């Protein structure tokens, strides 16, 4: 569950980087659809530009040159990818630790069961 927002950040950063790279390569006007709300999209014509605005979150949007935007997006993508990989490793480690703990709990339960059974049966016959 903790992995999902991080995964969405990686995917979002990748797609934003692809769009900015497209704008850098094609210095011409193009049309695109953009999302206004969950189920509402609008058609927009994007003129050639050397500046882009990036939504940084927390109600913050900043304008960057295309080169600065690509640098920032690359850095953010690398950071998010490293964090996602680390989180994945941590989740795998925790999963192994949970399995080990469950096996040990079962062993203690079985040991205690045998001990109680031996006590209930009384001294050896």
Image: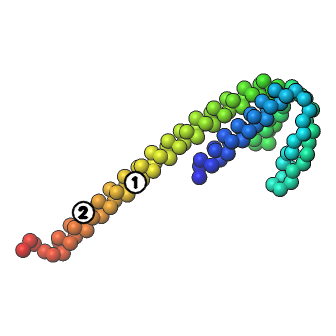
Dot 2, crowdedness within 10 Å: few (<14), some or many (≥20)? Answer: few
Q: Quadrant of the C terminus?
A: bottom left
Above-or-below relation of 67 to 80? above
28 displayed left or right of 106: right
Which of labels 2 and 1 is toward the front? Answer: 1
Can the viewer see residue 63 in this picture? no
Residue 40 in the image, given as x and y percentages of width and height: 86, 54
Q: Could you tell me which residue is drawn at 92 percent across and 32 percent down?
A: 29
The residue where tag 2 is placed is 111
Can the viewer see residue 8 in this picture? yes
Residue 24 in the image, given as x and y percentages of width and height: 82, 27
Residue 48 in the image, given as x and y percentages of width and height: 90, 29
Q: How far apart are marks 2 and 1 (CA)?
A: 18 Å
The residue where tag 1 is placed is 99
Q: Could you tell me which residue is drawn at 17 percent across and 71 percent down?
A: 119
Q: Could you tell me which residue is drawn at 63 percent across and 44 percent down?
A: 6
Residue 101 in the image, given as x and y percentages of width and height: 37, 54
Q: Quadrant of residue 32?
A: top right
Q: Could you tell me which residue is drawn at 17 percent across and 70 percent down?
A: 118
- Which residue is nearer to you in this view: 97 or 66? 66
Q: Secondary structure under badge 2?
A: helix
Q: Secondary structure under badge 1?
A: helix
Mark 2 or mark 1, earlier in chain: 1
Dot 1, crowdedness within 10 Å: few (<14), some or many (≥20)? Answer: few
Q: Which mark is residue 88?
A: none
109 displayed left or right of 56: left
- Which residue is nearer to you in this view: 45 or 57? 45
User: Which residue extends farthest top?
Assistant: 67
């Amino acid at each position: 569950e903790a992995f999902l927002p991080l995964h969405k950040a990686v995917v979002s950063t990748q797609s934003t980087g692809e769009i900015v790279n497209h704008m850098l390569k094609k210095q011409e006007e193009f049309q695109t659809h953009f999302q206004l709300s969950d189920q509402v999209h609008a058609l927009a014509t994007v003129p050639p530009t050397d500046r882009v605005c990036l939504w940084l979150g927390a109600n913050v949007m900043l304008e960057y040159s295309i080169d600065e935007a690509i640098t920032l997006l690359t850095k953010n993508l690398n950071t998010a990818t490293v964090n996602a990989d680390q989180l994945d490793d941590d989740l795998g480690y925790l999963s192994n630790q949970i399995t080990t703990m469950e096996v040990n709990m079962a062993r203690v339960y079985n040991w205690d069961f045998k001990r109680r059974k031996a006590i209930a049966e009384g001294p050896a016959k």
